[in-house]
Image (cartoon, grey):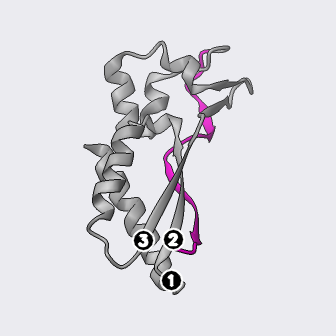
Amino acid sequence: MHEWSLAQAVINGALDYAKKHKLKRAIKINVVLGELQQIDVPAFKLALKELIKEQQAYKIKFKIKEEKAKLRCRACGFEWLFSKTKEKLSEQDSELIHFVPEVAHTYMRCPKCKSPDFEIIKGRGVQIESIEEISE
C-alpha cells in the first residue's frame, strides 16, 4: 500500500532530523497531506501507528493536516480547486494521479480554457511541516 511507504518516509525523515539536531526522546511531527496525492488518511494514520512501534528511540506524536490542492492555468491565469476537477476523472485516472501526481497534466485541463498547461500552487504531496521537541 502506497500510504505505508509514505508513512515510513515521514518517520525516517523525522528520526534523521531528530538525531541530527539532538532532540530528546519525545517529538511531535506536523505532517501536511496534499489533496492531489489523494492519501487514504485512515490508512496513513494506521501505517504511522504501526511503523512507529518499531522505533524505540523516540516517543513520537503526529499531527496531520490536509491541504486542498489549488491549481493555476498558465495560459489564462484561472485558478481552481482539484476537488472540482476530480469529479470528472475516471477512477483509473484518479488512481494514476494518486501514485504519480505529475501525470495530472495528462488527465486534467483548465476548466475555463481547456489548456493542460497549469501549475500546482498548493496541496501536492506529503510534507513534514515541522518537528518539535515536546515534554513527555
Residue 102 x/y as whole percent:
45, 39
Residue tagged 3: 59
Does residue 132 sit above or below 68 in this rendering?
Answer: below
Say what amino acid the circle numbered 2 marks: Ile
Residue 19 x/y as whole percent:
45, 83
Residue at mark 2 to residue at mark 3: CA–CA distance? 6 Å
Q: Cβ–Cβ below 8 Å for labels 2 and 3?
A: yes
Q: Residue at x 34, y 29 (%)?
A: 95
Residue 90 x/y as whole percent:
37, 15
In the image: residue 76, left or right of residue 95:
right
Residue tagged 2: 27
For residue 93, what is the image quadrant? top left
Q: Tell me which segment is drawn in magenta.
A: 114-136
Of 103 and 81, the residue lying toward us: 81
Residue at mark 2 to residue at mark 1: CA–CA distance? 7 Å
Mark sitting on residue 24: 1
Is 121 part of what is drawn in magenta? yes
Residue at mark 3 to residue at mark 1: CA–CA distance? 9 Å
Q: Cβ–Cβ below 8 Å for labels 3 and 1?
A: no
Mark sitting on residue 85: none
Say what amino acid the circle numbered 1 marks: Lys
In the image: residue 30, left or right of residue 121:
left
Helix or strand or loop: what does disc 3 sit on? strand
Q: Residue at x 59, y 34 (%)?
A: 69
Quick one: quadrant of the N terminus?
top left
Q: How many marks?
A: 3
Does residue 36 sit above or below 16 in this rendering?
Answer: above
Helix or strand or loop: what does disc 2 sit on? strand
Is 118 part of what is drawn in magenta? yes
Q: Cβ–Cβ below 8 Å for labels 2 and 1?
A: yes
Neighbour class for label 3 at 10 Å: few (<14), some, many (≥20)?
some
